[in-house]
Amino acid sequence: MPLWLLTVLASHDVTPHMRRVTFALENAQAFDHRPGQDLVLIMTGDDGQPGRRHYTVRSVDKAQGQLDIDFVLHGHGGPAERWALTAKPGDTLEARGPRGRTTINPAADWHLFVGDETCLPGIFSMIKSLPATAKAFAFIEVADKADQQPLTAVCDVELEWLVRGGPAEPGSRRLIDRLALFAPRPGRGHAYVIGETSTVRAQRQGLIARGFDKSQISAEGYWRPGRQGGHDHIFDEAEAAARG
Ligand SMILES: Cc1cc2nc3c(=O)[nH]c(=O)nc-3n(C[C@H](O)[C@H](O)[C@H](O)COP(=O)(O)OP(=O)(O)OC[C@H]3O[C@@H](n4cnc5c(N)ncnc54)[C@H](O)[C@@H]3O)c2cc1C
């Protein structure tokens, strides 16, 4: 994956639990990404060694040579969260990518997005990229009402916020139960199911049990308690065995 040098230009809190860092992006004309893809940021871990953290490309302005990343302030004091809280103009980061297969399926008749605040940057940028003829549904869980963000999109989108009223926890019943109530529309839809790993696994299994084909689901674990950085592939046991 290509290596990029990011230099902090500015940062501000978009909402109480989301800090946006705007970077100058060297060689921006060569930066090609699909909405929903992320960069692997090289961060110094707690052990002093270089670690990797995945962060979605929130937006890119190639003409200005700028790139935005939104960091969730999750409250566990991880290296990426600490970095975002103290980032100041002139600070630099190395990043590899863009990567990731959670991107729009252009053949889908409708699109269903589900995730927590770590997925908000990806879900918003994917929805914004849809044409006016597209139909989208989104369920996004956030800590507080004040963490909701306005969405401007040209497609027809129904966005529902699910407010926790506290820190994120694994196995979100709020998200799992809301998705279970979703009535699939006619045609062949595509579900983008991302966020905390055990929540995503339960949601994917629920969709498959309700008749979704696996090819209609993009699923990826963005974080889980105790894990540091990285991401989780979401397979069921039979698939995992088949993959060795
Ligand atoms: C493809 C992809 C795209 C992502 N895009 C974004 C993005 O745009 N913005 C964003 O903020 N995050 C995003 N994430 C999630 C982010 O990479 C993780 O939250 C990451 O672990 C944060 O790094 P850290 O150094 O702060 O904490 P780490 O050192 O990685 O984790 C320390 C501990 O903090 C806890 N923790 C970590 N993240 C969370 C969380 N979100 N909520 C609650 N507890 C948590 C866990 O218990 C963990 O063990 C993405 C992940 C993936 C895989």
Image: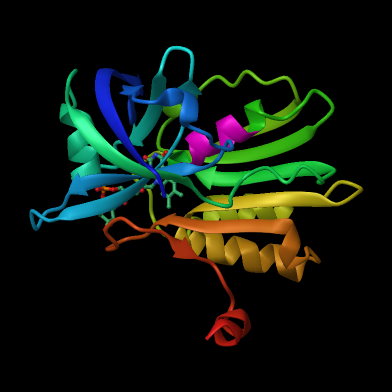
In this rendering, position of residue 165 left or right of residue 132: left
Q: Nearer the viewer, residue 14 or 103?
A: 103
Magenta-highlighted stretch: main secondary structure?
Answer: helix
Expressed as whole percent of the image width and height from the top left, the position of residue 6 reads 29, 29
Q: Nearer the viewer, residue 152 or 207?
A: 152
In this rendering, position of residue 80 left or right of residue 196: left
Q: Is residue 58 visible?
A: no
Q: Is residue 17 visible?
A: yes
Residue drawn at point x = 77 percent, y = 42 percent: 106
Of all residues, the one furthest to the top in this rendering is 64
In this rendering, position of residue 214 left or right of residue 185: left
| Colouring scheme applied when the structure was drawn | rainbow
Expressed as whole percent of the image width and height from the top left, the position of residue 142 reads 45, 37
Q: Which residues are magenta?
A: 119-126
Magenta region includes residue 120: yes
Magenta region includes residue 31: no
User: Relative to residue 14, is residue 120 depicted above or below?
Assistant: below
User: Relative to residue 233, is residue 50 depicted above or below?
Assistant: above
Number of on-image labels:
0
* Quarter-of-image position of residue 2: top left
Expressed as whole percent of the image width and height from the top left, the position of residue 203 reads 61, 61
Residue drawn at point x = 37 percent, y = 60 percent: 224
Expressed as whole percent of the image width and height from the top left, the position of residue 193 reads 60, 53
Residue drawn at point x = 62 percent, y = 18 percent: 152
In this rendering, position of residue 182 left or right of residue 73: right
User: Relative to residue 133, is residue 53 depicted above or below?
Assistant: below
Of all residues, the one furthest to the left in this rendering is 48
Residue drawn at point x = 82 percent, y = 46 percent: 107
